[in-house]
Image (cartoon, rainbow, N blue to C red):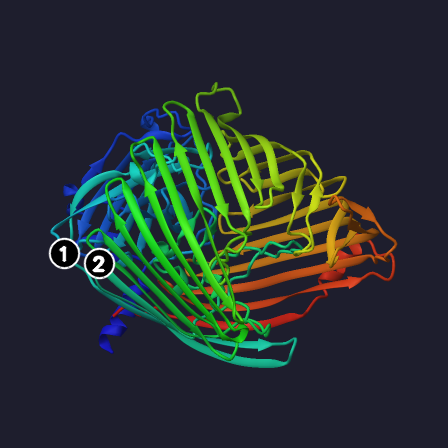
């Protein structure tokens, strides 16, 4: 009991002592004198590769300690350049002054971790896979501190050895890959060491490889939680308790388990009104499913093998979200051989059982992976198995090739379906400012991944060629700091030979000297077919036309009070006419700790085609309004208050009912069609008190709902939007406490 009490006290401390180091943003201890130092920072945003100017000079140091890897970075910041200290939630994408330390613990370019700290003391952490794919769902247990003075600011990190699995953890030294960067918010400029950029085919592989002393470490942590909920809409109350456990006996292996896991009630998904045949993808914030999940993220050409939201998702009997009895996962390595196992079991007659096993071999230029998944769904009398072989080949600094072959085998009520899918994605980072990408993917019409994985569709052959050109040396008087131009050719067909997509696109991504960015794109779509909209009742011809899109983001400048985002999109509808979508979202800052934004976006579709069942399609003259608002108040170092509001209103006036003719063209019929409206609301007010690292108390009030109804009178879009705020299908208050013990 005494040891647990001491651990709690230490976790609540504002500064952390590690041996002779104090993590306080200053490198004034004698231990730092022997640290490895890094210089020769170059500009990577824009990608001029120019040395960092003396007025923005950077001093970076790294020290291997028994507690973990300690890092210090001091960045000069001249007085004539505004400093932006805007507070932000964890992992929020906010343009502020910040610095990042990224590390590949195995030094093999397979996976890495990003630890970013802002000038305001907030953090963002992410897992990096597939060279440059960042996933911020993961929240790690690491320490940091910021110290600011007249000349600039210093940031210290302590990354514990237990934060990730590491192969060969029993050796005296370790070869790791490191990357340092700092960004100036006022100009958007970024300097880094080494010269590595995530927009290139190789990013992790370009980290600086260094040898450091290695210290053996083990870790054990458990996080119990308790949730009490009052449902006002249904006059009901309930309580739920559960626990996440994590054990790392050594650097090479780690194990995790969860009992009755929290489904993430304190995090709200983005509102989506989806009438399409393609499922919406949502990220996951449940700690068990984000803790060291990189090894299980198998994103093959043609589909993702593990979509964590399937576990504990909608039950097979349609009764709502499933309860998870328990789940376990283990991963680690034996030298160059890696392994991972995941298993979960849901409660009730409609519950499912999930199993995933993966093995990899990591070589100097070639990484091979083998994955097997199994899902048992007794309520549907269904069993689903998927096998996959994947390879990533990096023959040199210019080329990176990803290839995969998948096989699915399902049986539902005695009916078996088997098929193959996979493809190749190749990146060519040509000498100079050019880059090319090639895609070739085929998925059979009986290929099924969605029992545990995620695929937006099957039955297609897809080919794409992209070529990009960077322009990083623009005149000093230009408002732009850099441009990246890209041309893209796409063609997609199904196995019957119907063209699903054929287009050519030109686009430009620009960074501006005000720290913001701009994106413009024009895409010409050739005539094609939609074979999903009818849900198996035939393909429909899609009209050709020009689609354009543009967006602009202007961040807050220094101590300023205002920033904004705006976009505009014009695209052809399925049958005829165009869809126009756009809006603006200004953001207001009252100091560094309080901000609020209000965005209003609208869409007008002259002929919105919706499937009505069978071979019937309704055409509607549709108007849509979307209201978004966020309020963030960082009350103190441990307290924050967040308000999140999303409201969507749709006014759809019937034009006519249509049905396809023998050539797949929609023609009008005399079948009656009624007007309808949609209201969708999501409101959340959340208070958070930080007890310690990954330990919090949440008090959350949420309200919302969804309603689609036939319109009996003439109601304006504004009236429908106003009525949206009366929705109370979901009306509840929730109190949650979770505390991470690491004795």
Residue 135 visible in the displayed image: no
Q: Nearer the viewer, residue 303 or 741?
A: 303
713 sits left or right of 551 in the view: right
Quadrant housing the N terminus: bottom left
Check residue 252 in the rendering and tell me which mark sits there, or answer none: 2
Q: Earlier in the sequence, mark 2 or mark 1?
A: 1
Depth check: 41 or 301 in front? Answer: 301
Disc count in the image? 2
Residue 260 coordinates in the image, percent (x, y): 43, 75
Q: What mark, if any, has residue 415 been given in the picture?
A: none
In this view, 736 is above or below 417:
below
Nearest the camera: 727 or 278? 278
Q: Decide: marks 2, 1 in contact (CB < 8 A)?
A: yes
Mark 1 surroundings: few (<14), some (14-19) or many (≥20) residues within 10 A: some
At label 2, counting other C-alpha atoms closer than 10 Å, the crowd grade (few under 14, some 14-19, many 20 or more) is: many
Question: Viewed as shown, does residue 413 lie left or right of 625?
Answer: left
| Secondary structure type for disc 1 | loop
**Whether residue 474 is visible:** yes
Query: Which quarter of the picture shows residue 501?
Result: top right
Disc 1 target residue: 170
Front residue (pair 104, 727): 104
- The answer to whether residue 267 is above or below residue 183 is below
């Amino acid at each position: 009991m005494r040891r647990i009490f001491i651990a709690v006290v230490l976790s609540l401390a504002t500064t952390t002592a590690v041996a002779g180091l104090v993590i306080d943003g200053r490198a004034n201890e004698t231990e730092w004198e022997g640290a490895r130092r890094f210089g020769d920072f170059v500009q990577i945003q824009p990608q001029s590769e120019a040395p960092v100017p003396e007025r923005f000079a950077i001093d970076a140091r790294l020290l291997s300690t028994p507690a973990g890897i300690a890092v210090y970075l001091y960045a000069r910041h001249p007085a004539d350049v505004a400093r932006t200290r805007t507070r932000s939630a964890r992992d929020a994408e906010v343009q502020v002054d910040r610095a990042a330390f990224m590390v590949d613990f195995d030094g093999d370019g397979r996976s890495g971790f990003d630890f970013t700290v802002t000038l305001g003391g907030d953090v963002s952490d992410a897992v990096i896979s597939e060279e440059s794919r960042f996933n911020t769902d993961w929240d790690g247990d690491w320490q940091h501190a910021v110290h600011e003075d007249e000349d600039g600011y210093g940031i210290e990190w302590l990354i514990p050895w237990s934060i990730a699995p590491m192969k060969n953890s029993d050796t005296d030294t370790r070869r790791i890959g490191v990357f340092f960067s700092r960004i100036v918010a006022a100009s958007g400029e970024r300097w880094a060491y080494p010269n590595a950029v995530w927009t290139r085919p190789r990013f992790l592989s370009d980290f600086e490889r260094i040898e450091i002393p290695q210290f053996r470490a083990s870790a054990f942590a458990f996080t119990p939680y308790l949730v009490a909920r009052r449902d006002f809409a249904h006059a009901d109350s309930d309580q739920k308790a559960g626990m996440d456990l994590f054990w790392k006996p050594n650097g090479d292996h780690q194990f995790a388990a969860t009992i009755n896991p929290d489904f993430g009630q304190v995090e709200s998904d983005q509102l989506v009104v989806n009438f399409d045949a393609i499922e919406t993808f949502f990220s996951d914030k449940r700690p068990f499913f984000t803790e060291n999940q990189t090894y299980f993220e198998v994103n093959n050409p043609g589909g993702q093998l593990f979509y964590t939201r399937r576990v504990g998702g909608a039950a097979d009997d349609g009764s709502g979200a499933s309860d998870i009895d328990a789940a376990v996962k283990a991963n680690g390595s034996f030298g160059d051989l890696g392994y991972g196992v995941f298993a979960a079991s849901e409660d009730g007659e409609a519950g499912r059982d999930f199993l995933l096993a993966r093995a990899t071999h990591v070589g100097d230029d070639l990484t091979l992976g083998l994955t097997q998944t199994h899902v048992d769904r007794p309520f549907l009398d269904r069993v689903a198995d998927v096998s996959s072989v994947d390879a990533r080949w990096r023959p040199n600094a210019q080329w990176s090739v990803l290839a995969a072959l998948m096989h699915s085998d399902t049986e539902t009520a005695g009916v078996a379906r088997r098929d193959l899918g996979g493809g190749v994605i190749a990146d060519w980072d040509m000498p100079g400012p050019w880059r090319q990408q090639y895609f070739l993917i085929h998925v059979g019409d009986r290929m099924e991944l969605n029992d545990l994985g995620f695929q937006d569709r099957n039955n297609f052959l897809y080919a794409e060629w992209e070529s990009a050109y960077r322009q990083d040396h623009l005149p000093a008087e230009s408002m732009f700091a850099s441009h990246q131009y890209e041309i893209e050719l796409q063609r997609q067909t199904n196995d019957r030979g119907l063209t699903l997509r054929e287009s050519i696109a030109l686009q430009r991504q620009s960074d501006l000297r005000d720290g913001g960015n701009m994106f413009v794109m024009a895409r010409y779509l050739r005539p094609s077919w939609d074979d999903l909209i009818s849900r198996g009742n035939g393909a429909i011809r899609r009209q050709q036309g020009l689609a354009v899109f543009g967006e602009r983001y202007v961040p807050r400048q220094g101590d300023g009070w205002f920033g904004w985002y705006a976009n505009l999109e014009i695209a052809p509808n399925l049958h005829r006419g165009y869809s126009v979508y756009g809006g603006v979202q200004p953001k207001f800052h009252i100091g560094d700790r309080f901000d609020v934004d209000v965005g209003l976006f609208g869409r007008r579709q002259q002929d919105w085609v919706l499937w009505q069942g069978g071979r019937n399609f309704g055409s509607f003259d549709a108007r849509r309004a979307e209201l978004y608002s966020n309020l963030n108040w960082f009350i103190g170092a441990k307290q924050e208050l967040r308000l999140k509001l999303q409201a969507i209103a749709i006014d759809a006036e019937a034009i006519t009912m249509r049905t396809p003719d023998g050539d797949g063209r929609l023609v009008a019929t005399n079948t009656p069609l009624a007007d309808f409206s949609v209201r969708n609301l999501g409101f959340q007010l959340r208070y958070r008190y930080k007890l310690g690292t990954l330990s919090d108390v949440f008090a959350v009030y949420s309200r919302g709902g969804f309603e689609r109804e036939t319109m009996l009178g003439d109601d304006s879009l504004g009236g429908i939007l106003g009525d949206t705020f009366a929705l109370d299908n979901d009306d509840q208050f929730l109190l949650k406490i979770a505390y991470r013990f690491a004795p």
